[in-house]
Amino acid sequence: MSETKVMEALTWASSFLHVHGRDANAGEWLMQHVHNWTRSKLFYHMRDPIADEKVELFKQLVKEHCKGTPVQYLMGYAEFYGRDFDVNENVLIPRPETEELIEGILQRTDKLFPKNQVLRVVDIGTGSGAIAITLKKERPHWEVYAVDISQDALDVAKANSRKLEADITFLEGDLLSPFEGKGTRFDCIVSNPPYIPDRDREDMSVVVTDHEPHLALFAGEDGLDIYRKLIPQAIGLLSTPGCIGLEIGHGQGEAVANLFKEVNAEFNASVELDINGKERMVYLEVE
């Protein structure tokens, strides 16, 4: 048995991570992962020794993160809305800010539709399936669809839907193209599309740019390329009443809201801030 205690290993990790410009919390996350512990268990075992093989695995993971691999890819999962979603380098790591998009959709659909009405909902660019699966778990009576242009991403999403027992219809395709010309309409359309301007790439952390899929991150010179294509499609397939919810980058609110007005001058989309006070969501409600 090693003489290295949990607390000592975490102290080493914190220092090593700091020197390499990484989040010191990564040490705790990886220690929990190595032992399959909850956070409370981690603190309970702080003064306990660690088996030699677990010390080596822990140090290896910390060093891999310092080289740039995101913690979530090292662990193989990310928490989102209280559930663990499998992730790999074919999908974007779900962010806490996107949980606020979920909240906004649930609040607006509760207001627009009678309780327990079966809604047809679609998540565009589903990635890991986090949005589609969460909506299905929160509203089991909904009919939920999910689309992605990447078959590799859909494989991850399908695995998550099986693991979390969420009945989702998955389709491969570019945005809403799988539904166009088929008479399909949706009560709610939601998307967290790529929205980072290409010009921002060089200023971003290598943890993101060297590992997460660029297809899910970047969207042209101003970051609005996907919205220009998606918004007219979405409006064309939206039922009345209905709502559209889109995640955006900070500073894009007015431009995205104006894209709705370009389709219909009477559409007043609302721009909402996230918990950090940054523009993060745009919603259109049609009554």
Image (cartoon, rainbow, N blue to C red):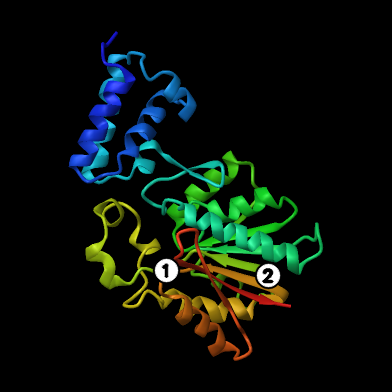
> Disc 1 or 2, which lies upstream in sequence?
2
Residue 126 in the image, given as x and y percentages of width and height? 51, 58
Position of residue 127 relative to residue 176, above or below, is above
Query: Can you see residue 171?
Result: no
SS class, disc 1: loop
Task: Name the residue rendered at 26%, 60% in the picture.
Answer: 204
Q: Which residue is mark 1?
A: 249
Residue that extends furthest to the top in the rendered view of this protein: 1
- Crowding at dot 1, Cα within 10 Å, few <14 / some 14-19 / many 20+, comes out as some
Q: Which mark is residue 186?
A: 2
Residue 258 in the image, given as x and y percentages of width and height? 51, 85
Position of residue 91 relative to residue 17, above or below, is below
Q: In the depicted view, which residue is nearer to us: 132 or 185?
A: 132
Horizontally, residue 130 falls left or right of residue 10, namely right
Residue that extends furthest to the bottom in the rendered view of this protein: 265
Residue 154 in the image, given as x and y percentages of width and height? 49, 54
Task: Name the residue rendered at 29%, 8% in the picture.
Answer: 1
Residue that extends furthest to the left in the rendered view of this protein: 19
Position of residue 62 relative to residue 214, above or below, is above
Inter-mark Cα distance, 1 to 2: 25 Å
Q: Amino acid at mark 2?
A: Phe
